[in-house]
Amino acid sequence: MTAFDMQTRHGEVCPLDTTLKILAGKWKSIIICRLMHGEQRFTELLHTLPGCTRRMLALQLQELMTDQIIKKTVDLNVIPIKTSYQLTELGMSLISIVQAMDAWGTTYIAALQPKKSATSQLTDERI
């Protein structure tokens, strides 16, 4: 199911579900972050994603292309053939959303970190 198809998942138009579907997936948000800085080749992306397999990266890239967030460019004029990925205009419009989510996540982690540390210390003292 494409992100566009998610718009009516609850029987009503839900743009939030569409957005979440685009970003859902273990590697999609980080792929978008990597491409925010410019186009990258498949192997360049793969090397910046420790733990991501070639197959998983290919699947995530395909989903992002299907949702028209990224585009693939093939340059046949060089040897070896150069295949690269970059954000589309729609993909670039996600940059501010991804940055806002990152800022919110930083605030969220900071807000919970002291509580978690205090809870961990209590647990450690009891053991």
Image (cartoon, rainbow, N blue to C red):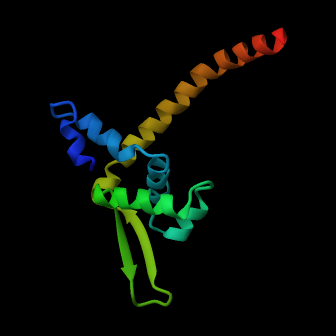
* Residue 33 image position (x, y, % from top left): 47, 52
Residue 22, placed above or below residue 42: above
- Please, is residue 118 above or below residue 55 in the view? above
Task: Give the number of marks.
Answer: 0
| Residue in front for this viewpoint, 107 or 53 | 53
- Residue at the (51%, 32%) spot, across then down: 105
- Residue 87, horizontal then vertical, whole percent: 37, 60
Q: Which of 4 and 85 is in front in this view?
A: 4
> Residue 5's x, y, as percent?
21, 45
Residue 24 lies in quadrant? top left
Quarter of the image where one finds residue 52: bottom right
Image coordinates of residue 97 in percent, x first then y, are: 37, 41
Rendered-image quadrant of the C terminus? top right
- The residue nearer to you, when weighing 53 against 65, is 53
Q: Residue at x 34, y 54 (%)?
A: 92
Q: In the image, 86: left or right of 10?
A: right
Q: Which residue is drawn at 29% across and 59% down?
A: 66
Image-based side of 122 in relation to 67, left or right: right
In the image, residue 22 above or below residue 105: below
Q: In this view, does 42 lie to the left or right of 5?
A: right
| Residue at x-position 62% and y-position 55% | 50
Q: Nearer the viewer, residue 88 or 28?
A: 28
